[in-house]
Amino acid sequence: MPRFFEGNLVAPKGRFAVCVSRFNGFITEQLLGGAVDALVRHGVNDADIDVYRCPGTWELAGLVRRVADSKQYAGVIALGCVIRGGTPHFDYVAGEVAKGVGQATLTADAAVTFGVLTTDTVEQAVDRAGVKAGNKGAEAAVACIEMVNLYARMGAK
């Protein structure tokens, strides 16, 4: 019989960092609220949650890497919102933030999760920030709890 390894949703030991972009704040503040609420509902003490804000989603990857590399956190959650406009700017920002946070995920001892919305319209962003499609910030926080517990079960730091 194979052995299965997966995390659970019990509050792990350790601190959590939420890195959030201020750009498109009407969306990112909803994502942040969802993430903090999900962490607390799953038993994380709110005193064990630190929030780091950066100007825009472009700056998010660098912030996430530095926070994860600080070795102060069991989990790091990246939150932002990029909405497609009439120029290729969306493609550059969305692609690079995904790549940068992905690199942090691969190299950090901490669990790193991605709660960055990349949408075609404002309406889609609003829906994913808690209106119709759940709150993607909360989903990233729950995934982070699970990954912290999975890494702990594997014997990782």
Image: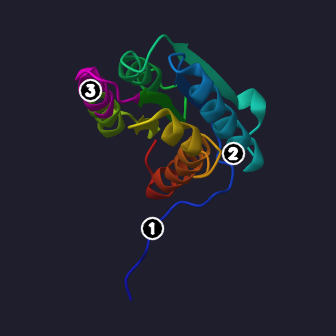
Asked if residue 109 can be seen in this view, the reply is yes
Q: Nearer the viewer, mark 3 or mark 1?
A: 3
Residue plotted at (60% across, 34% down): 31
Residue 60 drawn at (x, y percent): 42, 21
Circle 1 residue: 5
Quadrant in which residue 104 is drawn: top left
Circle 3 residue: 96
Asked if residue 15 can be seen in this view, the reply is no
Using a 10 Å C-alpha cutoff, classify the residue at mark 3 as few (fewer than 14 neighbours), some (14 to 19) or many (20 or more).
some
119 above or below 154? above
Residue at the extreme bottom of the image, as rendered:
1
Using a 10 Å C-alpha cutoff, classify the residue at mark 2 as few (fewer than 14 neighbours), some (14 to 19) or many (20 or more).
many
Q: Which mark is residue 136?
A: none
Residue plotted at (45% across, 67% down): 5
Secondary structure of residue under mark 1:
loop
Secondary structure of residue under mark 3:
helix
Circle 2 residue: 38
3 above or below 98? below
Residue 54 drawn at (x, y percent): 50, 13
**In front here: 19 or 34?**
34
Q: Nearer the viewer, mark 1 or mark 2?
A: 2
